[in-house]
Amino acid sequence: MAEQTGTKFIFKSTPGVIAWPCTVQKPLNGGGFSEELLTAKFEVISDGDYAELVGSPLSRLSTPDKPQGDLPLLQRALKGFEGLSDEDHKAVPDDVAVPVLLAQPYVVVGLVRGYMEMLGKRATKN
């Protein structure tokens, strides 16, 4: 009999919030990138909600009253950050950090990649 590894799966009706490391490629003056680690707290959303938020890859039917794409996905799944601090090493509250960071496209890319990695899916966007 083969040796089993891992832990036994425990059923939960809702998976809760999971802290996950995300790599953000921050652009540098003069070219190049700095890879920076950001620990995001994500809620695992259902496949149905995911499909509604992201849309079909074949037909992105985003409308003003029902936007689809990376930003709506993160607005739903991202619950905050762990250990985020400013230049003075002071903690940055989630209600301040989330809207500021979601307005930065390179951060959005890193967060989406991290979320997809967390789910075991491949991120398809660069």
Image (tube, rainbow, N blue to C red):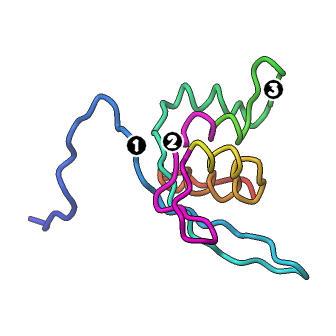
Q: Which of marks 2 and 3 is in front?
A: 2
Helix, strand or loop for disc 3 = loop
Q: Residue furthest top?
A: 65
Residue 109 percent coordinates (x, y): 70, 55
- The residue under the point 73% across, 54% down is 125
Work out how far the residue at label 1 is from the one at label 3, CA to CA, in angstroms.
27 Å
Magenta part of the chain: 74-94
Cα distance between the residues tagged 2 and 3 = 23 Å
- Please name which of the two marks, 2 or 1, marks the residue nearer to the observer: 2
Q: Nearer the viewer, residue 91 or 111?
A: 91
Amino acid type, residue under disc 1 in the picture = Val
Return the x and y of residue 49 as percentages of the image width and height. Answer: 56, 26
Q: Name the residue under label 3.
A: 62
Residue for point 60% across, 67% down: 23
Q: Earlier in the sequence, mark 2 or mark 1?
A: 1
Q: What residue type is labelled 3?
A: Ser
Rendering coords of residue 67 (x, y %): 76, 27
State the residue position of label 2. Answer: 79
For the C terminus, give its image quadrant.
bottom right
Split into 4 quadrants, where in the image is the N terminus? bottom left
- 117 part of magenta stretch: no
Residue drawn 35% across the image and 38% down it = 15
The amino acid marked with disc number 2 is: Lys
Q: In this view, does 74 lie to the left or right of 40?
A: right
Q: Which mark is residue 17?
A: 1
Upstream in the sequence, badge 2 or badge 3?
3
